[in-house]
Amino acid sequence: MMQINGFEAAIIGEASAYARDAVLAYSVEKMVAVLMTEQKMKEVEAIQYLEENILNTYHGEGMPVFITETDPEILADV
């Protein structure tokens, strides 16, 4: 499975879909925390970095999924 170097602490599991191999699943919030802690970025800088360099780019076959954790109370209204 493809991994994103430096973000091992942000792995929250695996994701799979019909007729596709499993891929790693990363928490976006944990990725932000990694950048804030290890790279001393401010939250807005970390989010911008992730959007420009990881989240909005194609990493090839088997690339991980990036999950934004949502409060279950918010989802109850959907």
Image (spheres, rainbow, N blue to C red):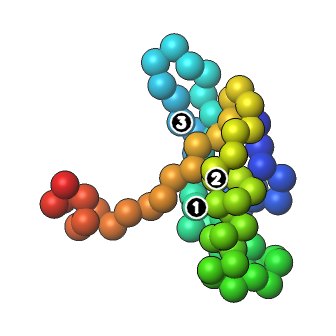
Q: Please name the residue that numbered disc 3 is placed on.
A: 15
Q: In which quarter of the image is the N terminus?
A: top right
**x and y, in percent, of residue 23 in the image:** 63, 34
Find numbered disc 2 in the image and state the secondary structure of the residue it sits on. Answer: helix
Task: Calculate the distance from the C-alpha at mark 1 to the C-alpha at mark 2.
Answer: 9 Å
Task: Calculate the distance from the C-alpha at mark 3 to the C-alpha at mark 2.
Answer: 16 Å
Of residues 45 and 72, the one nearer the viewer is 45
Q: In which quarter of the image is residue 21?
A: top right
**x and y, in percent, of residue 40 in the image:** 79, 84
Q: Please name the residue that numbered disc 2 is placed on.
A: 55
Residue placed at 83% from the left, 53% from the top?
5
- Left or right for 47, reference 70: right
Residue placed at 63% from the left, 81% from the top?
43
Q: Quadrant of residue 65?
A: top right
Looking at the image, residue 19 lies above or below residue 3: above
How crowded pointer 3 is (Cα within 10 Å; few <14, some 14-19, many 20+) is rated as some
Looking at the image, residue 56 lies above or below residue 20: below
Give, as a three-letter code, the residue at label 3: Ala
Looking at the image, residue 34 lies above or below residue 43: above
Callout 1 touching callout 2 (CB < 8 Å): yes
Q: Please name the residue that numbered disc 1 is placed on.
A: 28
**For the view shown, which residue lies furthest in the top direction?**
19
- Left or right for 13, reference 17: right
How crowded pointer 1 is (Cα within 10 Å; few <14, some 14-19, many 20+) is rated as many
**x and y, in percent, of residue 14 in the image:** 58, 39
Disc number lying in front (1 or 3): 1
Which of the two discs, 1 and 2, labels the residue nearer the N terminus?
1
